[in-house]
Image: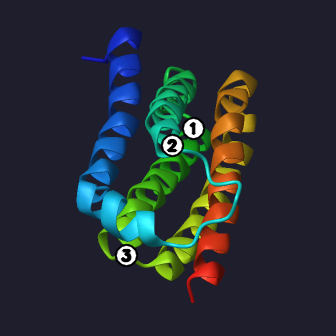
Amino acid sequence: MKPSNAAKLIVSCAVPILVGLFGAFFTTDDSINNWYANLNKPVFTPPDWLFGPVWTTLYILMGISAFLVWRKGLADKAIRKALVFFIVQLVFNALWSLLFFGLRSPLLGLIDIFLLEFAIILTLICFEEISIPAVLLLVPYLGWVTFAAILNLAIYFMNR
């Protein structure tokens, strides 16, 4: 039995949210209040309270974007390829919190976030063939990850 569009939408949104929960596991109070709070950070560092709402919004947008691609079916090789890239970028997304906060390594986080950016760009390129609205929903995510990469880079250099 084929999943309905409603089921696809629920799964498409649940997966990125679960990735976010995985990442949140590594952003413990100790990591935030002791380690991260004591790092030298650039003046453009957002307040801590902003990250939760932004990431929640981005995960939902990512889910809707994936749904717009998945709902076209899996028979087309381009759709399967696009969704594989989407999953790859989710893996890099999840790994960043583990590397940066869990291992307390701005360098490993930086390497990962550059791979994440590349994977998001490949996802956008693949999604473009299938659904322009899906691409547009991922643009804020790419923007935020680009900002996060710059922030990660600054933190790395300011704390060497």
The type of residue carrying mark 2 is Leu
Q: CA distance from mark 1 to mark 2?
A: 6 Å
* Residue visible at 39% across and 64% down in the picture: 95
Vertical placement of residue 103 versus 121, above or below: below
Q: Position of residue 129 (x, y in %)?
A: 74, 36
The type of residue carrying mark 1 is Ile
Q: Are marks 1 and 2 in contact (CB under 8 Å)?
A: yes
* Residue 127, quarter of picture: top right
Disc number lying in front (3 or 1): 3
Q: Position of residue 60 (x, y in %)?
A: 47, 26
Is residue 122 visible in the rendered image? The answer is: no
Q: CA distance from mark 3 to mark 1?
A: 36 Å
Q: At numbered mark 2, what does the secondary structure look like: helix, strand or loop?
A: helix
Give the quarter of the figure containing the N terminus: top left
Q: CA distance from mark 3 to mark 2?
A: 30 Å
* Residue visible at 57% across and 22% down in the picture: 68
Q: At numbered mark 1, what does the secondary structure look like: helix, strand or loop?
A: helix
- Circle 2 is placed at which residue position? 83
- Circle 3 is placed at which residue position? 104
- Circle 1 is placed at which residue position? 79
* Residue visible at 57% across and 89% down in the picture: 160
Q: Position of residue 72 (x, y in %)?
A: 55, 22
